[in-house]
Structure formats: C-alpha cells, structure tokens
Amino acid sequence: MRIKASALCLTAAAVLCLSTPLTAGAASHTVGEIQGLADGIVAYKVSSSGASGVQDWINGPLADGAGVASEWYIVGLSQSGSYDFSAYRNALETYLETATVYSATARQKYALALKAAGSSSDYITRTASDSIGQLGIMSWDYGLHLLNNGVSGSYSQDDVINGILSMQLSDGGWAVIGEYGDVDVTAMTINALAPHYPYNGAVQQAVNAGLELLSQRQLESGGFATMGAENPESSAQVITALSALGIDCQQDDRFIKEGNSPIDGMLKFRLGDGSFTHNEGGSFNDSATVQAYYSLVAYMRMTQGRSPLLILDKQPDPVTEPPATQPAQTQSAHDNTKPAAGTSTAGTAASSAVVSSSVVTAVSGTSETPAETEVSVSFMTSSYTAAESTAVPETFTTSAQTAAVAQIIEGQKKSGSYKPFAVAVAIAAAVILSLILLACGKRSWKNFLAVWLAAAIAAAVILLTDIRSPEDYYTGTVTKENAVGKVSMTIRCDTIADQQDSEYAEHIPEDGVILETTDFEFAEGDSVYTILTDAARTFGIQTDSRGGFTGMVYVAGINYLYEFQFGDLSGWIYHVNGVAPSVGCGEYIVQDGDRIEWLYTLEVGNDLVQEGTK
C-alpha cells in the first residue's frame, strides 16, 4: 500500500514530537537558502552540460546518460518540480531492454528511476520480484522503497522490514559487512524504514537506536565521516533520512554539534559554482553533488509537509509517441530521443565526447578474442562497445562501425597513428552524405547541419580518445607524471581457491592470489578503481566493469571470475586498510599509504576478515 504523504508526515511529526526535544541551537539556513542551494546545483549541471534549461537538460544529457549516471538526478527533479520525463523514460527503457544488469541494487535503482519518471514498464515489478535480499542489506533497503511505492514483489513489506531489523547490529546501526554500524548504510536503512515508523513499534525501537548511533558519530562540524574521512555524501544521507522521519536536522538537539547541523557539515564541501567536492579543497565530484542535491530536495519536502524523497509523487501516465516518419539522417541535431539498440546518434556521441579529456580507450578481452568484436571504450570508470559510443553517421550499421574501428586499429599498427586517417574518414563520410542529400533533394539547412555536426563530434571523439590493441593497452607499466604518493593493492580469491574442479578452475590460482601485494603510484584524485585499472594494464589482468562516467562504477568480474558464479551472494568486494567502504570503488579517493584488497566473496563480504572500527 502506498504511504500517503500527508498522513505520513503528520503522524510522524506527532510521534517524534513526543520523544524528541527540539532546539534552535544552530544558526539555521532559511527555507529560501536551502531552495537556492538546490537550484544552484541544477543551474550548475544545466550550464556545464550546455543545455538551455532544465527541460533541455532532461531531454538531452540526462536522457543520453540513462542507465549510466542520470538516475538520482531524475529522482530529485521528479520530487521537486513538474517536468516532462518522457525522453529520459524512453531512453532508460530502451537501455534496459538490452543491458545485462548484474547488481540487484542497480536494478532496484533503475526501477525507482523508472517509477519516478512515470514509467509503467514491467521491469519495475520484475525487479521487485527477483532482487530483494539478493545483495545484502542495501538490496533489502531499496527493495523496501519499491514496496513502499505500491510495487508488488516476492516479499511483503512486513517480510522485508523483519529482514532489515534482523540485520541491525549491536551498536544500533547497519553495515554492508562487519560488526559495527556504518553511517551511510544506517542512514539509508532508516530512510527505507521511515514510512513505517509511526505505527510499527519494532521499527520505532530500531530506528531510535540507529538515530542514537548517528548522533554519536556526528562531528563538531555537523558533518559525518566514512573510513575516518569527513565527506558530504555521509551528511547528505543523514539529512535525507532525518527528513524522511519529519525531523528538521537544523532544529534537533541530537544533531547539533558546536552549533553546526548536518547541513553545515555538508556545505563545507560546496564549491563556488554551486557543485560539491568529495574532499574538502578538492574539485567537482558528481556523486557528492547529486547526493547533496537530493538531500536538499528531501529537506525541502519535509518543510513543506510532503512525503519523503523516495515515496514518489505520481507522474503523469506515459503517452505513446507516434512513430517518426522522417528518415533518420534528416533528424535535427537537437533530437534527444535515445536510439534503439544497435544504432548511434550524434546526441549520444556528444555526451561521450565532452566527459573528459583524459579518456582511455582499450581493446578488452584476450588475444584469442577477435578485436573487431570486443572493442570497448573506457571513459575511466565505464566500458561500452565501440558500436554504442563511437560517433558515425546514422546510416552506418553496427557491423559497419565495428569494421571501421577494426580498420582504425589495424591502421594504427602500421602507421603508428590512426587519428589523421580516422578524422579524414569522418570528413569524407560527411561529404558523401551531403552529396547524397543534394541528389535526393533534401536541401534543408537542418539536414546539412546534422551531418556536419555529427562529423564534428566524431572528430572530437577521435581526437580525445586513444584506441589501442591488447598488446599496446597492456603496456607492462603505467606512468604517473604527477604522482603524489603510493598505495598497495592485492587481488585474491582465497574463498574459492579449493574449487579446482569447477568449470572456472583455469582462472583460479591454487593459492588464491591473482595479484601479489604490489605498490602503485597515484595522482591527485585517483580512485580505487583507477588503481585497479592501472593494475589490469600493468599485469594483463582481465576486468569487467559497468557504471557511469562520474565514479559510480561496478566491478562485475576480475580475471574472468564473475559475481554469482559461486552462489547468489558471490562477487567482488574491496577493502581499504582492512575495512569495506560504503562508497563505490570509483568514488573512493585513495590516500598515501592506503592498503587496497580486492577479494572474492561468497556471502556479500560476511565471509571475509575485516578490521572492525568503532
């Protein structure tokens, strides 16, 4: 049953007021200031993406990034304003038709984003039926969010609530692994339980214990730390959780330290342009920015007496769009509709071209795998087939694109540089298409603009990327010109070292060690995932990662050993200095002396030794 906003907030407020002393001890930010902070993030994203406004940002960059890095922005926007999400909705539905999403929590995130965008796709109900509880506490939490929104699944709300309560640790918190509560996971769990707080005594008791833990962990700055490092994401999760309960984090004694609230703690990481950094004094980080954004939206909704962030407002029913009648090559360059699988557009290429100037393009797989079928483009934290991300005229087929990339690789081997040839091919293709348009009488300036814009984007992608053969990619060394320190890393699969009679035995070392503890230099801003990629290139270790350009990356396989190969809870997990962080490997920024371990787990990390920290 969907929790109604007004009933939830009024009841929650009544319950909390009986037990929670409020104070005006903090220098509160006004509602207008909070709204301005949220608007500032949106303005930054709109401006930096080149969009003309919020709707154009949704239709263009967010739709192009569907399934990659757009989902939490869509959730925040859907809960803070009235927009048309049809372009994004269609793009995500198309992406999910062909994508293989291994992570249960990733599927739940997509289902929530679809729901927020007004989709009626059966992907939502299928996810609620096959993902809850499949990947530890977080899959229970996000599964409960789906059920809270009226989605039917394989478990009832009571079943999921009981499962979550059974995983509460002795200190009152929750964690992915280990015996001590984690700030982020505890806050996220409270957020999921919040709609049931007013009328479920067991939930009240558990949530109150969790709130006590969060209060104890709060720093004098008002913020929170994960792995000993203060960061805005942890504060954002606490703000979101408290807001879901109807608690004003600027007015509650428990969450005011030295006159500072969680919002003050989070704002330490705000940059001058309105975005947020992960490390104080650092540069823009999209994960920190989007979490700050939706926490501010959650706070605003609380002050307005509206439902929690993830009790989603009902979006208008999707309208079936009539099929396009014009040929693909005459579409406007500003048409932001996501293409069907196997096609390529200038729009998708544009979003890829402007992501980063430090793009690394590699050929994945082994020498036994034909390069023309395994070319992948890695934008630091994600991999896509060349057919999906290489900008070519729309009249080219996927096979033609793949063949073209293979030719480029071969040309590079012979000449040492493929870029002049590739740019020439893009220009020649534009000339040929222009002549075809003239011959067919399609002389609108828009047609020629689309063709040459596609050619320009293709040239930009070529100049900003570096396509390499396996031999060139696995160089045996990775040089850090601006190294600021060293970390060590090992990759092990001790938990399956005895599986020498399994079908995956050829990839399992007898001692379980894929990579001995090895030192790696790192540059400012390098993440755990960056170090993993460096190791893969240096020692020829196969990796398979999925995720976005902004750090939200998921490692599905290492050395051809994948999640779920040894059970429903099996897969790769990483530790830093003996503890499993609560952020993704692309978001964890390494520091000098860090000890990184990539470990294969059979029980979502519960079978691994972890150094507990209070």
Image (spheres, grey):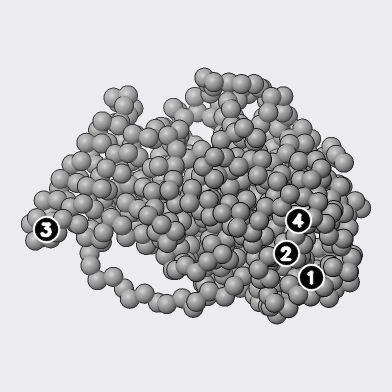
User: At 51% from the left edge and 72% from the top edge, which residue is drawn?
Assistant: 119
Does label 2 or label 4 sit earlier along the sequence?
2
- Observer-nearest of 307 and 302: 302
Q: Which mark is residue 86?
A: none
Relative to 309, residue 237 above or below: above
> Where residue 17 sits in the image (x, y, percent)?
84, 68
> Where residue 80 sits in the image (x, y, percent)?
56, 64
Q: Which mark is residue 244?
A: 2
**Mark pair 2, 1: CA separation:** 10 Å
Q: Where is residue 484, by image quadrant?
A: top right
Looking at the image, can residue 188 be seen?
no
Contact between marks 2 and 3 (CB within 8 A): the answer is no
User: At 60% from the left edge and 25% from the top edge, which residue is drawn?
Assistant: 522
Q: What residue is shown with label 4? A: 249
**Mark pair 1, 4: CA separation:** 13 Å
Q: Are there few (<14), some (14-19), or many (20+) residues within 10 Å of tag 1?
A: some
Please state which of the two labelled residues, at mark 4 or mark 3, is closer to the viewer.
4
User: At 66% from the left edge and 56% from the top edge, which residue is drawn?
Assistant: 30
Q: What residue is shown with label 1? A: 13
- Observer-nearest of 383 and 297: 297
Please state which of the two labelled residues, at mark 2 or mark 3, is closer to the viewer.
2
Relative to 178, residue 486 above or below: above
Does label 1 or label 4 sit earlier along the sequence?
1
